[in-house]
Amino acid sequence: MNEKRGSPRPGPVRWLLYVYGAGLPPRYREWVLHDVTARTWVLRHLIRATVQMAPLGILIYLALPGPVGIRLASVFAGVLLGFFYSFAYIHETAEHRAVKAGYPPGTVAAVHAARNAAERAAQERRYAEAWRTESTPD
């Protein structure tokens, strides 16, 4: 069993169920938090969204009558729309997954904010140095 921060990683079947919205057993609680707060959390979200849309895209391509170009364009448009909505609600989705795993609402946002606090402070300092020069009266 692969360990992630002291918590086991779900196997392929459980991960696939997790991708489609099923909750995981409590022993995967820490892994879920890692999944939605790791530095690669956006990439992980993209992979989950792609896995969610793939079967529907394949089904539409196979079931839709007409030329190949039209079917591909239809699938492409649907995937673009799916990614648009998926990324429009990326933070809410991550938070919902953490809440389903037993964490209080706001946990994901707090972890992200804590991780980015040092970088945000450095950016604010650089901005202040560049743009907030004190002017001296003549």
Image (spheres, rainbow, N blue to C red):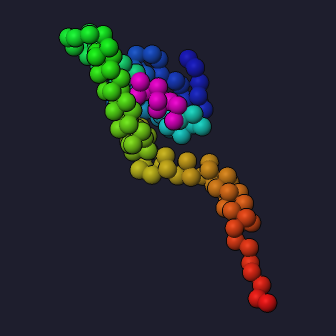
Residue lying at 74% horizontally and 66% vertically, measured from the top left: 129
Residue 16 at x, y = what percent? Answer: 39, 20
**Most common secondary structure along the magenta stretch:** helix
Q: Is residue 137 above or below residue 49?
A: below
Q: Is residue 42 above or below residue 127?
A: above
Residue lying at 69% horizontally and 67% vertically, measured from the top left: 131
Q: Nearer the viewer, residue 103 or 128?
A: 128
Membership of 45 in magenta stretch = yes
Residue sitting farthest toward the bottom: 138
- The magenta region covers 42-50
Taking the image as drawn, is residue 1 in sight?
yes
Q: Is residue 14 above or below residue 6?
A: above
Taking the image as drawn, is residue 34 in sight?
no
Residue 137: name its quadrant.
Answer: bottom right
Q: Can you say which quadrant of the picture contains the C terminus?
A: bottom right
Q: Nearer the viewer, residue 136 or 41?
A: 136
Residue 72 at x, y = what percent? Answer: 33, 16
Relative to 7, 84 lies left or right: left
Membership of 25 in magenta stretch = no
Q: Nearer the viewer, residue 131 or 21?
A: 131
Residue 96: name its quadrant.
Answer: top left
